Image (spheres, rainbow, N blue to C red):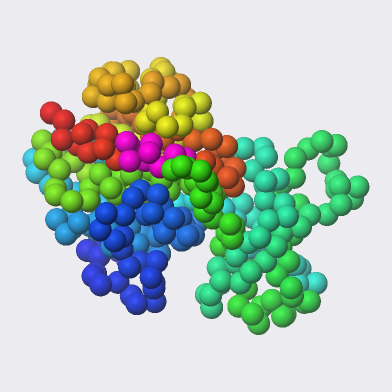
Amino acid sequence: MTGPRCIARPLAVALGLLLAGSPAGASALDMLARLQAIPAPSGFEDTLRSALAVDLPGWSRPEVDAVGNLIVDFGGEGSVRMIAAPLDETGYVVSGLDTLGYLRLARLSGSGRLFDQFHVGQRFRILTSRGPLPAVSAAPSTHLRRGPAGEPLGANDLWLDAGFHTRTEAGRAGVRVLDPVTLVERFTRLAGERAAGPSYEARAEAVALLRALMGERPATRGRWVVAFTAQAQPGGRGLRRLVRRYQPTELYLLGGFPKARLGLGPAVQADSLRGLDSALPAVLLKLGGKGVQRQGPAFAPDRAGLDPLDRARVAVLGLPVRYARTPSELVDGADVEALAAFLRRLMEAP
């Protein structure tokens, strides 16, 4: 793909029921249950991107650029204001096949000293070109590990067992180096409107942005561009391309707030961290009123794609999340609905 293209409808039948679109009146949690089931490791967001595109309204005329960003450009004159939500999730790829049939992993993206340790003893899927293959992760005995005592396990300590006896057998089954690997347990419904899963906070923010666009076209003033960004986790590659293309004057990044309280609505980063605008948070807090939480640092993977020379005024807003950067990120569906409504108000504000 060499440039922007319009998304064809209908999409390939092979995407199946996951891409059938949300039924009328589906709740945010219903949409999340469907979309969370679709793996989207960095660089492998195609299926999720297509699923989101199915739910976009007809007026939106979405396009996909060469990096894989899903873009809705409202058109119009004047400076651009942009909202960006990441498409991709943290994960691994196959880095090698052992002579005994074990698979070795390399981290594709992820953060935190304990990230790899959370994945010991978990059930995985290897996403091969022939289809997904089940596997489980193991780790060598702590008595045989090298390195300082007490160091958390890393990606090199993870061994994936898919039941193969030899490297040749794994290759014949379709396993190749750089095949993405994701967890099997992707969505756990909890009490009330709460649910959890790997990279669930980012997926919930993508759903909130999607729901803000559904229905009639927002009554925007000026020119807005909304983007679901590809390859956000490993360095914000998708956002960098968007910023170069549109040169927005205002940029709203969606991110997670581990210290915000669940069920009290979305949050806005209101500290004075370098690179963030000092005035936009006040505007957002006034717009949201009592339904928006004022918070400190947030995790927004797209921020890595910003250049200090970019002229955009940047703000971070998003969802409260519990157990952030673990395979069990927990989000409240009521907060997702509230964030969708807040984003809609933002796009329609003067």
User: Where is residue 204 drawn, in percent x and y?
Assistant: 41, 45
> Is the C terminus in the top left, top right, bottom left or bottom right quadrant?
top left
Q: Quadrant of residue 162?
A: bottom right
Label total for image? 0
Is residue 338 one of those drawn in magenta? yes
Left or right of 216? Residue 150 is: right
- Residue under the point 58% across and 45% down: 328
- Toward the right, the furthest residue is 143
Tell which residue pokes out farthest to the left in this image.
Answer: 77
> Quick one: 311 or 170, which is closer to the camera?
170
> With respect to residue 273, does 172 lie above or below?
below
Classified by dominant secondary structure, the portion drawn in magenta counts as helix
Q: Nearer the viewer, residue 332 or 181?
A: 332
- In the picture shown, does residue 264 fall above or below 197? above
- Taking the spot 64% from the left edge, 80% from the top edge, the residue there is 173
Whether residue 96 is visible, yes or no, is no
In the rendered view, does 237 fall on the left or right side of 156?
A: left
Q: Quadrant of the N terminus?
A: bottom left
Which x, y percent locates residue 141? 86, 52
Q: Residue furthest front?
A: 192
Q: Position of residue 115 (x, y in %)?
A: 64, 43
Magenta region: 331-339
Residue 206 appears in the figure: yes
Q: Position of residue 320 (x, y in %)?
A: 45, 33
